[in-house]
Image (spheres, coloured by chain):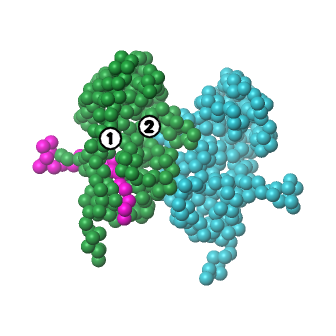
Chain colours: A green, B cyan
Amino acid sequence: MIPRQARKSIGTVINGKSIAEEIRSRVASEVKRMKECIGKVPGLAVILVGDRRDSQTYVRNKIKACEEAGIKSVMAELPNYCAEDDVMTAVLKFNEDPSVHGVLVQLPLPEHLDEEKILNVLSLEKDVDGFHPVNMGNLAMRGREPLFIPCTPKGCLELLIRSGVEIAGKKAVVIGRSNIVGLPISLLLQRHHATVSIVHACTKNPEQITREADIVVTAAGVPNLIRSSWLKQGSVVIDVGTCPIEDPSSEFGYRLVGDVCYEEALRVASAVTPVPGGVGPMTIAMLLCNTLDSAKRVYGFA
Amino acid sequence: MIPRQARKSIGTVINGKSIAEEIRSRVASEVKRMKECIGKVPGLAVILVGDRRDSQTYVRNKIKACEEAGIKSVMAELPNYCAEDDVMTAVLKFNEDPSVHGVLVQLPLPEHLDEEKILNVLSLEKDVDGFHPVNMGNLAMRGREPLFIPCTPKGCLELLIRSGVEIAGKKAVVIGRSNIVGLPISLLLQRHHATVSIVHACTKNPEQITREADIVVTAAGVPNLIRSSWLKQGSVVIDVGTCPIEDPSSEFGYRLVGDVCYEEALRVASAVTPVPGGVGPMTIAMLLCNTLDSAKRVYGFA
């Protein structure tokens, strides 16, 4: 029988929304200071190809966040069936534009476009998403410093650090190995001296491996995958999964759920991020940070 | 009490020496075929800075192996206190030389030289060591293909494959996280769908983590670190560690030992690589393969 107190919530909710707001307000005051001191502001260029509704929403949110922080944003919208050269031209134009300090190609691209080829031409100095292989290689290699750390992984790390979670020497399990989340978060945690295991679709007994972790970062995109039986008592759980599921009672007919059975996790873990309101808001906050840092580097502004 | 049969050797010795010889002989016949068909041979350039005896030995062995395989080798030797520009000039010269298909800067470099800066100018198409961040980034990222996989990790993988070890879905533990072995082998095993954990100096209970692995690749450089108690029954152990220890009875006054207590491991593991004669010979064999592949790519020779 489960002892009674084990059924109660013991975990803290990691409030990504309020942490992200704090960071965005800090970025805004830094941008203001930059403008006052040198008469310049950071600039972000976003390239959106096609008409995916989720991508449109993400891009709109990014641009809105730039506006609120005083970051100049420009956008290139290209139709679904545009030629690869058109996307390349847009990237190269922003690479050359001195008022642009970050260039972002919203992923995924339509299938006929070669994502690798397009991302490879993106200026390393403006790769605020951190997806260029040189940035990824430098993130992986010890003694190297990537110019940019991908936004979602950077946001996860920030949540851990701000929640006072010790990382060095701790067992961390990353669930999922995508290029944009799982891979860079595993490299980043290792950089901070965690003992990292990467769990993915081919892993046998993922539950058993995850149950040994002090820190769990999950980016599987499988609603309610992580039950309380997957978690060690007192662990910290960062939920990157966001999956829309139908919900007629909601305003939009759907709601977002993470990989983690949130209420269950709170009974076992010491801290858990909610979905929504956990990692999601941090991604945009980190994009603003990366863009600001890039502009500071260009202008030598400290 | 340990049951009697557990004390007997049950493991197979993975004979890296004979596998490496077989690969080298295959490379030699490919080089011969290339010469006969198109009148060209692969070329390797080696840059050696300073007078480290171990580096001199490694470079000598590489050049000898090239000769035996019919690969043309050229060498640039620079004194310990040369300027960074001199090393850069040597790299750039070989980058431009069309008869050179692989350029290798023997590491470690003397401390006053910026290794990162030097390796970054090395032509990506000639980076047969696979240490350029673009190659490392592409090794890490799913759906990307690095032009070259670092030689020692590639050799470890080859030993596993040739020994009939299944990798997908297996638990693999990599001990050590150096840029030249631990990191790329962990990325490579993950590419082959193993569930990978990386153990390093900050890891608590490395023994416990390692004992759960089906595949152990160790590159810690700590003699006899891995005792039988670290290993799961039936696991496969690849020992990359090579440490010279004093041995007055040996011809040179020292002998090489690995990270693994070899005799102990053979009693528990299903297969173990010896030191010497395991991974060591594979590194050079893979360097020849990478150089051959590079030349084939340049000449469009299949």
User: Is B64 or B51 nearer to us in this picture?
Assistant: B51
Residue A145 visible within the image: yes
Q: Amino acid at mark 2?
A: Ile
Which of the 4 image quadrants contains residue A50?
top left
For the point 82% across and 56% down, the residue is B254
Span colored in magenta:
A233-253
Give me the disc on residue A149: 2
Q: Residue, x 29% and y 62% (percent of image)?
A: A10
Q: Is residue A208 above or below residue B116?
A: below
- Asked whether B193 or B36 is in front, the reply is B193
What residue appears at the point 44 percent right and 24 percent down from the top-left corner? A301
The reply to whether the magenta stretch includes residue B129 is: no
What number is the disc on residue A175?
Answer: none
Assess whether residue A247 is covered by the magenta stretch: yes
Task: Residue type at mark 1: give it.
Answer: Met
- Residue labelled with disc 1: A282
